[in-house]
Image: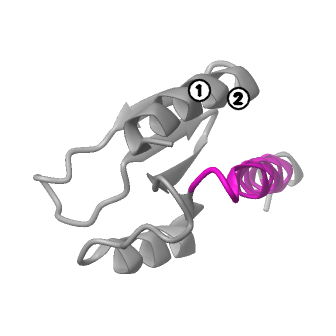
Amino acid sequence: MLENKFKTGLVKELKERFPGCMVVHLDPNEIQGIPDLLILHEDTWAALEGKKSAKASHRPNQDYYVQHMSEMSFAAFIYPENKEEILNAMERSFEAHRAARVSGS
């Protein structure tokens, strides 16, 4: 599967799975290695770096930014082979953030 086709379907699925979310395409020319997509949902966010397959190479700085942004909220590499696993983890992250907000933590 081509990477662009995967990302197009992914954006559609994100909007269906997380109603009301905003999906923003980030500019890699602004910050080299920054993930492709920023997903804003309610009062939290996630960043996803789309790849055409699990074996696709990572560009310079991508591992750094995915790790750094994951420590801040949620970020991951996503590709067809792990899509459901990553979307489920992202959903759990959003739910945990919502639960912490409701409990006052």
Q: How is the image coloured?
A: one colour
Determine the residue located farthest toward the left in the rendered image: 29
Q: Residue at 61% of width from left, 40% of height from top? A: 43
Q: Residue 56 is drawn in which quadrant?
A: bottom left
Task: Assign the magenta stretch its main secondary structure.
Answer: helix
76 in the magenta segment: no
On the image, the x and y values in percent for residue 29 come to 11, 53
Give the structural element (helix, strand or loop) at label 1: loop
Marks 2 and 1 close (CB-CB < 8 Å): yes
Image quadrant holding the C terminus, namely: bottom right
On the image, the x and y values in percent for residue 23 come to 47, 31
Q: Which residues are magenta?
A: 79-100
On the image, the x and y values in percent for residue 64 come to 36, 80
- Vertically, is 6 above or below 9? below
Determine the residue located farthest toward the front in the rendered image: 1
94 in the magenta segment: yes
Give the amino acid type for the residue marked by disc 2 in the picture: Phe
Residue matched to label 2 = 18
Residue matched to label 1 = 21
Q: Residue at 77% of width from left, 47% of height from top? A: 91
- Pick whichever, 72 or 37, lies toward us: 37
